[in-house]
């Protein structure tokens, strides 16, 4: 099972067939609603995720009787030696018209990396996100314009094109 189209496609590329995915959203809730995710009592389920990822999927599967194990295969983090100066210069020159963030952690890292001056620019720049949960976080930190990409694939590119089509 895959949470979204991108993961499902990546699994197919490496020869994994029969991948199921939600057709109406790309998140844990939509995955858990699939018929195949209902009767999991006694089944062993391995979840590939980032370090310190959300617990909602595993918790629900455990409540349904599954034995869940994690394979933490990536880490979201602030780059240790990133120089924000080129990005800040682009903001100053009005060279950035939109920003994307695929997780709340990514947004938080970007805010920290850009510092006080960059934060002001970022708060005024349209932010495109793949999920309402990330949109709520963005609004809570003060982003003025947050656009949640539309399901089912939550395609940020399509949302960006649609947003800027009027120009």
Image (tube, rainbow, N blue to C red):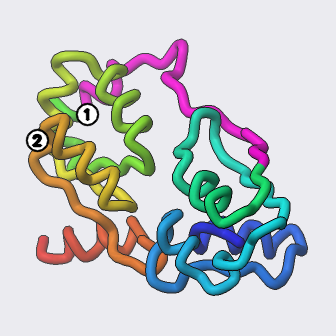
Q: Quadrant of residue 156?
A: bottom left
Give the percent coordinates (x, y) of residue 149.
33, 68
Q: Quadrant of residue 129?
A: bottom left
Residue 96 relative to residue 1: left or right: left
Residue displayed at 59% across by 67% down: 3
In the rendered image, which quarter contains the C terminus?
A: bottom left
- Residue sitting nearer the eye, 17 or 39: 39
Q: Is residue 102 above or below residue 142?
A: below
Secondary structure beneath dot 2 equals: helix
Is 83 part of what is drawn in magenta?
yes
Residue 59 relative to residue 164: left or right: right
In the rendered image, which quarter contains the N terminus?
A: bottom right
Q: Residues within 10 Å of mark 2 (few under 14, many from 20)?
A: some
- Residue sitting nearer the eye, 129 or 90: 129
- For disc 1, the marked residue is 90
The mark nearer the N terminus, 1 or 2, is: 1
- For disc 2, the marked residue is 124
Residue 78 relative to residue 167: left or right: right
Give the percent coordinates (x, y) of residue 102.
44, 50
| Residue 12 tag number | none
Can I make out residue 93 in this image? no
Range drawn in magenta: 69-90
Q: Is residue 119 above or below residue 45?
A: above
- Residue sitting nearer the eye, 160 or 24: 24
Disc 1 or disc 2, which is closer to the eye? 2
Q: Is residue 150 above or below residue 61?
A: below
């Amino acid at each position: 099972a895959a949470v979204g189209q991108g993961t499902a496609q990546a699994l197919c590329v490496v020869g994994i067939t029969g991948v199921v995915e939600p057709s109406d959203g790309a998140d844990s809730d939509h995955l858990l609603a699939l018929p195949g995710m209902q009767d999991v009592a006694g089944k062993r389920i391995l979840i590939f995720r980032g370090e310190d990822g959300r617990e909602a999927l595993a918790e629900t599967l455990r409540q349904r009787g599954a034995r869940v194990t994690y394979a933490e295969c990536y880490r979201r983090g602030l780059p240790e030696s990133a120089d924000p100066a080129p990005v800040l210069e682009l903001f100053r020159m009005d060279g950035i018209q939109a920003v994307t963030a695929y997780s709340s952690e990514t947004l938080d890292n970007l805010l920290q990396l850009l510092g006080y001056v960059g934060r002001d620019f970022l708060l005024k720049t349209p932010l495109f996100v793949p999920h309402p949960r990330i949109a709520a976080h963005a609004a809570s930190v003060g982003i003025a314009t947050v656009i949640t990409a539309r399901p089912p694939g939550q395609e940020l590119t399509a949302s960006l094109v649609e947003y800027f089509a009027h120009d």
